[in-house]
Image (spheres, helix red, strand yellow):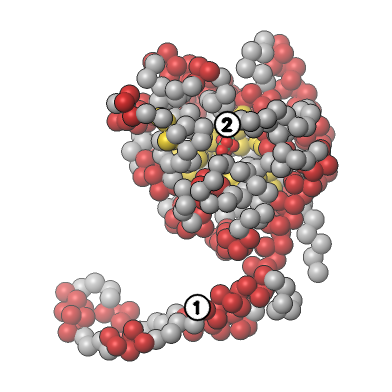
Amino acid sequence: MPDFTPTPADKFTFGLWTVGNTGRDPFGESTRNALTAPYIVQKLAELGAYGVNLHDNDLVPIDATPSERDRIVTEFKQALSDHGLVVPMATTNLFTDPAFKDGAFTSADARVRAFALQKTMHSMDLGAELGAKTYVFWGGREGTEVDASGKLLDALQWYREGLNYLAEYSEHQGYGYRFALEPKPNEPRGDIFLPTVGSALGFIHTLDRPELFGVNPEFAHETMAGLNFVHAVAQAIDAGKLYHIDLNDQKMSRFDQDLRFGAENLKSAFFLVKLLEDSGYDGPRHFDAHALRTEDEAGVWAFARGCMRTYLMLREKARQWSEDAEIQAALAAYRVEDEELAQLTAFSQENAQALKNRTFDRQALGRRGPGLEQLDQLTVELLLGLRGNP
Ligand code: GCO
Ligand code: MN
Ligand code: MN
């Protein structure tokens, strides 16, 4: 029985803002003390994580002087090298400061849009200095509560111009970033632009350098929208656009909960892990979640350990699933292939004519039971640990 202790080879990452979350919510104050960045690095390394990600202001306060910034960054880099952690992803805080209350790249105020570009370039410089190769754009304030602004089409154009500009900047600086757009349907705005993975994938193809852009799908965000996260990730993989992933959990249609990975939708988490592992995705497995507000610091580390441990347990279950003879037989029986039809459905004039003339036993097709009830029940029993350990 594997012991499910993570190692850096598993590529688990956390944000400074995740384990550093102090439990504040719109209705109540912090319930835990803030943790320093070097301490977070030390603790994550002890737990077996691979890396730590950050927004600019998770590390450097927005009003820090240049010398304060340099001191903080030097201390942080020292902690990273002392404990062997990397920073694979960086991002910008374009949501906390009141300047961004009506959007950053999509603000109707050209001064705010330019300030957002300036802040992001400084943050990209910081990320590059720390070795980040993925740069995330989560447009938390890019949206509206009221559409009386009449800015929808302009906002999308401003968004596009901002992303095009920053891609140029990255290339010009030689940073080599791959950019990952992170969709979310709402919260903190009433409606956020590019609300789903599908919207982001569509938008990417309107950019000047689409090859530099992919997505950073988040379990909670698609689930808030009532969508199937595993399907969204599959579509991102199919498009060659899964550049990063935010793992957490969430009850459907609620406020943004950021629950521990696997805490709520265990079966979806299983199919997600299986999809990631089967697909050969080799990027970080990033946990964008936080401990419950009820917890003290011990609860924070129990949360972090739990995220990684659940991922590893589900990875082991995925391995068992692919080696379970009965499950594999049910899976094989589910699919029907036909060599003659494979030929006829390769397009040519003659094949198309032959296919049009072909007789199908429609009633027989409709009568066939594909065995999905049994296959799914076998999966449930495997997840519950009742199918041995092949
Ligand atoms: C949220 C988002 C953020 C982003 C983060 C990095 O719902 O608050 O998921 O946590 O992931 O800003 O881009
Ligand atoms: Mn989120
Ligand atoms: Mn996220």
Nearest the eye: 379 or 115:
379
Q: Residues within 10 Å of mark 2 (few under 14, many from 20)?
A: many
Nearest the eye: 31 or 91:
31
Please identify the residue farthest to the front as the structure is shown.
27
- Rendered location of residue 178, percent (x, y): 51, 38
State the quadrant of the N terminus.
bottom right
Q: Residues within 10 Å of mark 1 (few under 14, many from 20)?
A: few
Q: Nearer the viewer, mark 2 or mark 1?
A: 1
**In the rendering, which numbered label is found on residue 54?**
none
Q: Where 171 sits versus 222, above or below?
A: above
Label 2 CB-ligand 1 distance < 8 A: yes
- Rendered location of residue 170, percent (x, y): 50, 28
Q: Is residue 45 visible?
A: no
Residue occupying the point 43% across, 41% down: 195
Residue occupying the point 40% across, 25% down: 106
Q: Where 163 sits versus 356, above or below?
A: above
Nearest the eye: 287 or 27:
27
Tell me which label, 2 or 1, sits earlier in the chain.
Answer: 2
Q: Say what secondary structure mark 1 lies in.
A: helix
Q: Is residue 178 visible?
A: yes
Tell me if label 2 and label 1 are in contact, CB under 8 Å.
Answer: no
Q: Real-space Cα distance between discs 2 and 1?
A: 42 Å
Q: Quadrant of residue 322?
A: bottom right
- Rendered location of residue 363, percent (x, y): 29, 88
Residue occupying the point 42% across, 13% down: 111
Q: Quadrant of residue 65?
A: top right
Residue marked by disc 1: 372
Residue marked by disc 2: 91
